[in-house]
Amino acid sequence: EPEVTQTPSHQVTQMGQEVILRCVPISNHLYFYWYRQILGQKVEFLVSFYNNEISEKSEIFDDQFSVERPDGSNFTLKIRSTKLEDSAMYFCASSEPGWPEAFFGQGTRLTVV
Amino acid sequence: DQQVKQNSPSLSVQEGRISILNCDYTNSMFDYFLWYKKYPAEGPTFLISISSIKDKNEDGRFTVFLNKSAKHLSLHIVPSQPGDSAVYFCAAKAGNAGNMLTFGGGTRLMVKP
């Protein structure tokens, strides 16, 4: 069964450093998303991406964040200068056109120290 | 922001019995609702969804009921199995917000053998 894959599974970084989280969405999906879940809190929407541009973003997705689809298969989330409060599970997801059902990857646990 | 609420943080059910997980929402613009299941260290897995034009959707052991006037939905699992033990998230999509999903806080279901 097709699945969304994310790398790395765990990333530890120093505060102020840049991190790039990587995702390979399901191949025939055209909508891509990043969500995050801070420990003990809700899963929160960050950004959606369609047709090589951001289609929606939340208040969390400020100038420190950016997304890119550098090639036909990868979708990345970059955090320019990490803060302690960026520590969370980051989930990539993708969906087919016309279908709200998003399929999630297994997540990347980001720990900022 | 409490647009989607799951008021029961946990639920314990005997194997073979019915599990009922509840979800309430406040945003009248939500037009599509989804349930996800999440095991530890994994991403959310899509279970079942329902459009606001329906009041029931069934898929095997899983049935979702939607009461629009009460802004309430529920997920019924019959019969419950130990492998159903996980955290269940309710999520909703607004008609005017693309494919962005708003999640509830989750309910941890424990099915006892």
Image (cartoon, coloured by chain):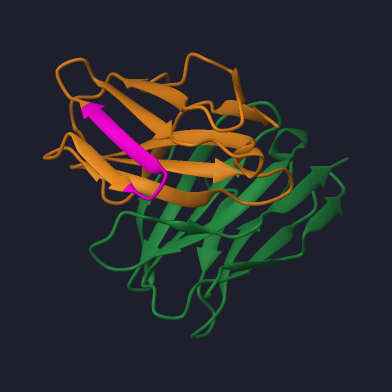
Q: Which chain identifier belongs to the green chain?
A: A
**Residue A39, position as x, y percentages in the image:** 71, 31
For residue B25, say whether it is visible.
yes
Task: Choose between B85 and B38: the one closer to the eye.
Answer: B85
Quadrant hosting residue B38:
top right
Q: Residue at x 44, y 49 (%)?
A: B47
Quadrant of image for the C terminus of chain A: top right
* Above or below for B20 versus A44: above
Residue B45 is left or right of residue A31, and the answer is right
In the image, farthest residue toward the left: B53
Q: Residue at x 48, y 43 (%)?
A: B36
**Residue B104, position as x, y percentages in the image:** 46, 28
Task: Choose between A70 and B58: the one closer to the eye.
Answer: B58
Q: Residue at x 85, y 51 (%)?
A: A13
**Residue A99, position as x, y percentages in the image:** 28, 60
Q: Which span is picked out in magenta? A: B59-66
Q: Reply yes or no: does residue A36 show up in magenta.
A: no
Count of marks, rendered view: 0
* Above or below for A23 versus B64: below
In the image, farthest residue toward the bottom: A72
**Residue A54, position as x, y percentages in the image:** 38, 60
In the image, farthest residue toward the front: B16
Task: Choose between A6 and B77: the one closer to the eye.
Answer: B77
Quadrant hosting residue B55:
top left
For residue B4, say whether it is visible.
no
Quadrant hosting residue B33:
top left
Residue A41 is left or right of residue A84, and the answer is left
Chief secondary structure of the magenta span? strand
Chain B takes which shade in the image? Answer: orange
Residue A21 is left or right of residue B11, and the answer is right
Q: Reply yes or no: does residue B64 show up in magenta.
A: yes
* Above or below for B113 versus A55: above
